[in-house]
Image (cartoon, grey):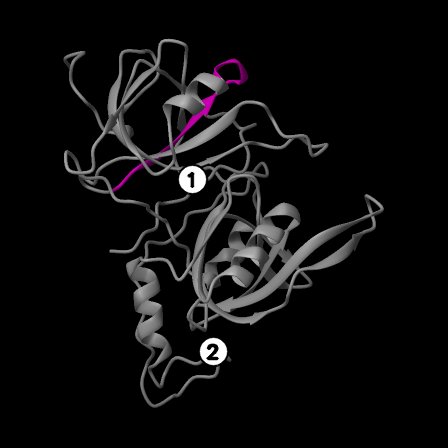
Amino acid sequence: MSSNSYVHLRNVETGRIDWKIKIRIIREWRGVSLTGERFKGYNLLLLDAKVRYTYRMVAYVPEWLTEKMQKLFTVGNMYTVTNFQVKQYTANDKWRCVNNDRQILFTNNTAAKQIHESEYFIPNNHFDFFEMEELSNLAKQNVYLADAVGVVIKRDNLRPVRNTKLGTDQMQVRMKMTDGKKKINVIFWDKFAEDFQQDIDSNQYEEPLILIIASGKVGVWKEETDICNFSPTAYFINYKHHSVQQLRKLISEANFSLDITYSTSQPRKPLRSIRHVELDIGREFVRKIMEKRWR
């Protein structure tokens, strides 16, 4: 392969640093330590153009490069990026927002140039949705976060909740949402919850809300599945995405009910075709989850 050739994210590997890629930055976040302290380095979620399928990969910016890279990159823009390292994830890398085994590490040699929207095409975003009835499987592991989309059927306003372990109050927003087959609890915490509530209060969204939760942390409480925010989590309300459009259309159909009671006269139209998830919980982490996406 010529060192001047651009490659897709799925083809970058360890052992080289002279990679050249074309990507869109779709998210950024900082990790949080066990004590709640935010790391000084930060993460970028990269998306490349669709060939066989769209591919996402996380790039890590170490603390000492943070100022330089924040001046270089803006979320939402496309860039050519050159000269970076690729490293394998290890069993200690928990709560990943993508299902692959590698991540990018930017270095002092990493360079980037913005691509104009008229010059190249990369989608504005991408999600790997799980069916809600499958999310409970993810509560048994601590490696992967999940993308989910559903209609909000119940929503409480922001309120403080006592954390008995910490002895302090935490702000919380609780919701329920459904994909028409199953409902799950949604719990947003702390600053994330406050930002969500402010968003709701400041905008006039079409009701019912259709909510995309990207990279949510799945759990089970009292035999009910819930999804809550974690460091990489983002939300999108009534987002311009075909999954949202399809759900909005299904809401008006007689066989889609927001209270999960269906007409038995005809089968419900499936939201999408999915591949089966292969889980191995052997040592408290999932070895492999087959990629799941809308066709």
Q: Position of residue 149 (x, y in %)?
A: 42, 60
Q: Is residue 42 visible?
A: yes
Whether tag 2 and tag 1 are in contact, CB under 8 A, the answer is no
Q: Which residue is pictured at 42% across the width and 55% down the height?
A: 130
Q: Is residue 88 visible?
A: no
Label 2 sits on residue: 258
Res 188 label: none
Residue range corresponding to the magenta coloring: 54-65
53 versus 110 height, above or below: below
Secondary structure under tag 1 reads loop
Q: Nearer the viewer, residue 67 or 226?
A: 67
Q: Nearer the viewer, mark 2 or mark 1?
A: 2
In this image, 124 relative to 161: left or right?
A: left
17 versus 230 height, above or below: above
Q: Nearer the viewer, residue 268 or 279?
A: 268
State which tag comes first along the sequence, 2 or 1.
2
Q: Position of residue 211 (x, y in %)?
A: 45, 61
* Quarter-of-image position of residue 13: top left
Q: Which residue is pictured at 20% across the width and 33% down the height?
A: 116
